[in-house]
Image: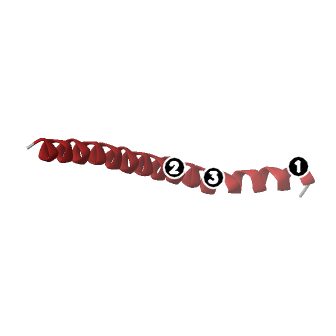
Amino acid sequence: MTAWEIFVDVSLSLVPPLLVGGIFYVIMRSILRADSKEREVYSQIEAEERAKLEKK
């Protein structure tokens, strides 16, 4: 085997783990962003409800 063939084999063997890692990163990032948005909206609703209770 030449050095070029070894390089190509190593490069091709790294493609599947990199793709799986990329997909995992995108999924986890979207989950964490959705969770932070949900917490933000929940705290806003909670603040509005507390303000309504204070007015009564």
Q: Secondary structure at mark 1?
A: helix
> Which residue is at 32% across, 47% downward?
38
Q: Return the mark for residue 33.
A: none
**On the image, numbered disc 3 is attached to which residue?**
18
Sequence-wise, the earlier of marks 3 and 2 is 3
Sequence-wise, the earlier of marks 3 and 1 is 1
Residue type of the residue flagged with mark 3: Leu
> Which residue is at 13% across, 41% downward?
55
Residue 44, image x and y in percent?
A: 28, 42
Residue 31, image x and y in percent?
A: 40, 50
Kindly give the residue lying farthest to the left in the view shown.
Answer: 56
Numbered-mark total: 3
In this orientation, which residue lies closer to the viewer: 1 or 18?
A: 18
Task: Assess whether mark 1 and mark 3 are in contact (beta carbons under 8 angstroms).
Answer: no
The residue carrying pointer 3 sits among few (fewer than 14), some (14 to 19) or many (20 or more) residues within 10 Å by Cα, namely few
Residue type of the residue flagged with mark 2: Ile
> Which residue is at 69% across, 55% downward?
14
Kindly give the residue lying farthest to the right in the view shown.
Answer: 2
Residue type of the residue flagged with mark 1: Trp
Q: What's the distance in space between the residues labelled 3 and 2, CA to CA?
A: 9 Å
Q: What's the distance in space between the residues labelled 3 and 1, CA to CA?
A: 21 Å
Residue 4, image x and y in percent?
A: 88, 49
Q: Secondary structure at mark 3?
A: helix
**On the image, numbered disc 1 is attached to which residue?**
4
Q: Quadrant of the N terminus?
A: bottom right
Residue 28, image x and y in percent?
A: 47, 53
Sequence-wise, the earlier of marks 2 and 1 is 1
Q: What's the distance in space between the residues labelled 2 and 1, CA to CA?
A: 29 Å
**On the image, numbered disc 2 is attached to which residue?**
23
